[in-house]
Image (cartoon, helix red, strand yellow):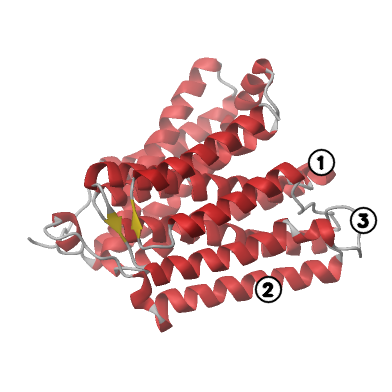
Amino acid sequence: MKSPTSLPVWPLAAPIAGWLLLGGASFGFGGAYQILLVLGLIASVLAAVYHAEVVAHRIGEPYGTLVLALAVTLIEVALIVSLMLAGGPETTGLARDTVFAAIMIILNGIVGICLLLGAGRHREQTFGLLGVSASLATLAAIAILTLVLPNYTSSAAGPYYNSSQLIFIAVISLVLYGTFVLVQTVRHRDYFLPREAVGDEEVHAEPPTPKVAWISAVALLVCLGAVVLLAKSLAPALETAIAAMGAPKTLVGIVIAAIVLLPEGLAAVRAARANRLQTSLNLALGSALASIGLTIPAVVVVSLATGLTITLGLDIKSTVLLLLSLMVATLSLGTGRTTVMQGTVHLVIFAVYLFTTIVP
């Protein structure tokens, strides 16, 4: 099979259309225009998945799965920081809520769907235990230190860290995430390499040319920017709809986080269905690590520079769900083999998370 030398038109046109629709939103068109924005958002998400897979195929594993996680997280950080600066004191818990929603969506929603659909198609799937174990250990450490420990420190009253504690926890988060990336890409790269499915043409096909890969890399950033900004543009209409239903405002953050994570989620599900569960778990767990490992330090810098107090500690209900999710993930991914049972358990926990958010 020859190396691909060109890209289809649709993944290049989709983000352009998304940005044009985003520009048109400033003219204040009516409700019908919101439908076009939703269509532009969906098209941009699908295009992002396509370009991410092109880049991943060119550079190989595990670097490929790292690309989408870092790209989405950097844009997520930019969005959170901009909202914090614009919203002032009312956004003190924004980083915490966004990071927690991302962890729950990834650890239970995306992983659960991947395990259920993958096992439903292939009965039983296997993956490298060493890489997944390292990912879960790092995720558990960063999550507990940033989202749970603030509730039990005494230097500052409430679920907060004081300035010196914020600096320390930001450094710790970067050290843990940086070490994980070093292990994943250099020192123990083989831990994260997928056990490729025999006869999978998609896996063994010739990689795209460097020119095509570079075009897709740039287009990926354009797509992700369109996804985040279109989601932000649709947020007011979403808030109005949720208020009309009488649901809590925290549901808005979950919906926005789900939209931002759609590219990673779709790529992970597609890999699981193709019997490449290692790639799927690399995407999911790597995204969760990047989300918390990069977001918290960035928010800490903003907090110290602007004097804004950031709320990091979770409430009791959220803490229980976080600890349950980490424990179940450690058990279900602790054998190197998965069936539909593990996928069902993760999805049930995700359903409980969504239900208790709406009906606290």
The residue at the far left in this view is 1
Residue 71: tell me if it is visible. Answer: no
Residue at numbered disc 2: 172
In the depicted structure, whether residue 120 falls above or below residue 277: above
Contact between labelled residues 1 and 3, with CB atoms less than 8 Å apart: no
Label 1 neighbour load within 10 Å: few <14, some 14-19, many 20+:
few
Is 283 left or right of 348, judged from the image as shown?
left
Q: Horizontally, is 11 left or right of 303 in the view?
A: left
Identify residue type, mark 1: Glu
The type of residue carrying mark 3 is: Ala
Q: Is residue 113 visible?
A: yes
Q: Residue shown at 41%/34% (left/top)?
A: 42
Q: Quadrant of residue 60?
A: bottom left
Looking at the picture, tell me which residue is in the foreground, 304 or 8: 304
- In the image, which is nearer the foreground, mark 3 or mark 1? 3
| Inter-mark Cα distance, 1 to 2 | 27 Å
Circle 3: is it few (<14), some (14-19), or many (20+) Cα within 10 Å?
few
Quadrant, the C terminus: top right
- The CA distance from mark 3 to mark 1 is 18 Å
Q: Are marks 1 and 2 in contact (CB under 8 Å)?
A: no
Nearer to me, 314 or 343:
343
Give residue 258's position: percent from left, percent from top.
Answer: 52, 40
Q: Earlier in the sequence, mark 2 or mark 3?
A: 3
Q: Which mark is residue 157?
A: 3
In this rendering, position of residue 95 left or right of residue 340: right
Residue type (three-letter) at the residue carrying disc 2: Ile
Query: Residue visible at 54% across and 77% down?
Result: 179
Q: Which mark is residue 90?
A: 1
Q: CA distance from mark 2 to mark 3?
A: 22 Å
Query: Could you tell me which secondary element the residue under label 3 belongs to?
Result: loop
